[in-house]
Amino acid sequence: MLKRLVTARETILLGAIVMLLALIATRFPGFVAPGNLASVFNDTSPLILLALGQMIVILTKCIDLSVAANLALTGMVVAMLNVAYPGVPVPVILVIAVTLGTIMGLFNGLLVWKLEIPPIVVTLGTMTIYRGIIFLISEGKWVNSHEMSDPFKAFPRAEVLGLPVLSWVAILAVVVIYLLMTRTTLGRAFYAVGGNPHAAVYAGINVGRTQFWAYTIAGALAGITGYLWVSRYAVAYVDIAGGFELTVVAACVIGGVSIAGGIGSVIGALLGAVFLGVINNALPVINVSPFWQLAISGGAIIIAVALNARANRTKGRVILKRAEQAA
Amino acid sequence: MSVMQKVLTTAAMATSLAATTTAANAQDMRIALVVKALGIGFFEAAAKGAEEAAGELGGTEIIYTGPTDTTAEGQIEVINSLIAQGVDAIAISANDPDALVPALKKAMDRGITVISWDSGVAPEGRMMHLNPSSTELIGNTILKLAADHMPDGGDVAILSASATATNQNAWIEAAKAVLPNYPGINLVATVYGDDLSDKSYREAQGLMATYPDLKAIIAPTTVGILASCQAVTDEGKIGQVNVTGLGLPSEMAGCVESGATESFAIWNPIDLGYAATYIAHELAAGNAAAEPGASISMGRIGAVTLDDTNTGAMSDPFTYDASNIEEFKSIF
């Protein structure tokens, strides 16, 4: 039991994060102060939200490249709505954001399920479509801080029990998705579909519909992140979160989610996102040349993935040995 | 295209080629205004100015285009498509000074007038470059904006766009050159937010964490200045850290109102788009030649004089603060 816990990807990753923090602390001690760690977590919250959705999609052998575009379009719509009707209360905005995100995820899911188009092609297409729609509705204009209403901007910053609401949304999402993945039929179906699609069909699981639900959940999470992103940075324009979909996939991969599907956990995705969040927040304060920053981020990804690959291999062997012993 | 149309077009082209001496241009002149990326307020305003110039000049059609993200690759695709369309002139604000040279050379080989504006292209890739203002003047202005509100001196930091952005780097170099003129002002760091709001926000937070005594953040980029302003507001450091640099009045109104920004500067992008279009028209029509020492008309703005590298400056940057922001925020 202890050995399993020690060799688990999650534990290794947690160890890596702690080591990283220790390393950063030698150059900038203030970074590991509890207040700063909380702000790092808060800054990473959007990434965590998207990584959770992406994890589910990747588990089912698919990929969602449209999450960042979904986020940007939802963000732009709610921002423009706020400008046009400043009186609309935040709960209504939240409902609209989640609904809109869900619809976009649903659209991806339907294309993958009913038309059986390869997921990477579908989401590559919808990514461009969603970004294009932002152009159309905004005519390329920005929505700026002074045009947004104060309650609209205050929501993600409001402090509850010492943490901003943005952080709480991420924590809530982690708990809900964790329960979904471990305690519901649908959650187990995600693993089954990615682990062995043929076996899943024989077990009576509709592979296409399971993938459809994965996209829908990812869309809903992207939608809520869209509002939080726009209100946090207090600006909405076509390019917000440009290229962020790759960071999200990277967070999942670092977190031990197998790109081939079927392997991954909520805690893994959470830690993967936090790992990237720590790097992103640490590089500016430890005086690393900007020319090295990208290389360092990339290097960290490769190292993490290499460790994961090794961890996966040993785990596979152990299972086989057990099976032999049982026989 | 029907055969008849083809014959007519060929005939028309032949006529216009033959009639260069009379300089009579029956067909509309098509000028492409290529920007760093679509959807940026500054460039949208420049496009407005270009339309204004086209209206004044008459017989001119503006093609406002650019990639959807700020990459040289995207601009090369746009340039190739413009060459295929056979436009008369390309006026470009470049994402990279060197990467675009081969594509733009190809355009010039096909007889297309190529000028760069705002963010320049290496001399071999364009006929001339129009700077919005002189680099030295901008460098001095952004530093002065910070120094004006720091009577006792102190630490300032620069938050730029990407580490390879041509214009930002030139301004930062110019600012560093005049640093000795501002005793007590200490430039502690230059960081890069890549013109992404989340990265710029994080870099601004990092600056405030690393340099607790920081008095001002200078961001010579519209995304960076807004993100810094938001980061300063969220950290509760309004009044302690002054955010300044280059921004658009319509985007900066909130920052000036909240006090996070005392003042900032920008040249008028409408004028810039207007001037670039006017110059492109003059060159393409053969009314002027791009050579060192030449003076080319910019319509209502005056004339630009080219230096040894065929570069000219439009005008001085203009400072905006609480006293005039209301007036300008609805314009651009």
Image (cartoon, coloured by chain):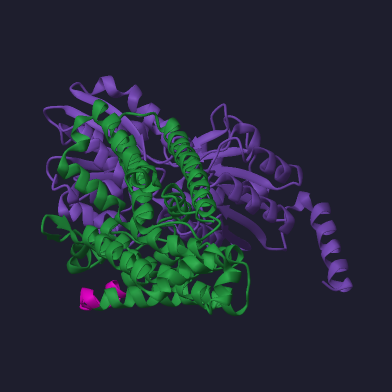
Chain colours: A green, B purple
The magenta segment: A80-91
Picture coordinates of residue B262, whole percent (x, y): 18, 45
Q: Is residue B87 above or below residue B94?
A: below
Looking at the picture, tell me which residue is in the foreground, B1 or A36. Answer: A36
In the image, is residue A90 part of the stretch drawn in magenta?
yes
The residue lying at 39 percent from left, 33 percent from top is B171
Picture coordinates of residue B95, whole percent (x, y): 53, 43
Q: Quadrant of residue B16?
A: bottom right
The residue lying at 72 percent from left, 53 percent from top is B23
Q: Is residue A269 above or below residue A102?
A: above
Q: Is residue B17 left or right of residue A112?
A: right
Residue B142 makes an appearance in the image: no
Quadrant that contains the C terminus of chain A: bottom right
The residue lying at 57 percent from left, 47 percent from top is B92
Q: How many numbered marks are there?
A: 0
Residue B232 makes an appearance in the image: yes
The residue lying at 16 percent from left, 42 percent from top is A34
Q: Is residue A37 left or right of residue A186?
A: left
Picture coordinates of residue A23, whole percent (x, y): 29, 29
In the image, is residue B312 part of the stretch drawn in magenta?
no
Q: Is residue A283 above or below residue B50?
A: above
Looking at the picture, tell me which residue is in the foreground, A304 or B290. Answer: A304
Looking at the picture, tell me which residue is in the foreground, A76 or B33. Answer: A76
Q: Is residue A31 above or below residue B27?
A: above
Picture coordinates of residue B135, whole percent (x, y): 42, 33
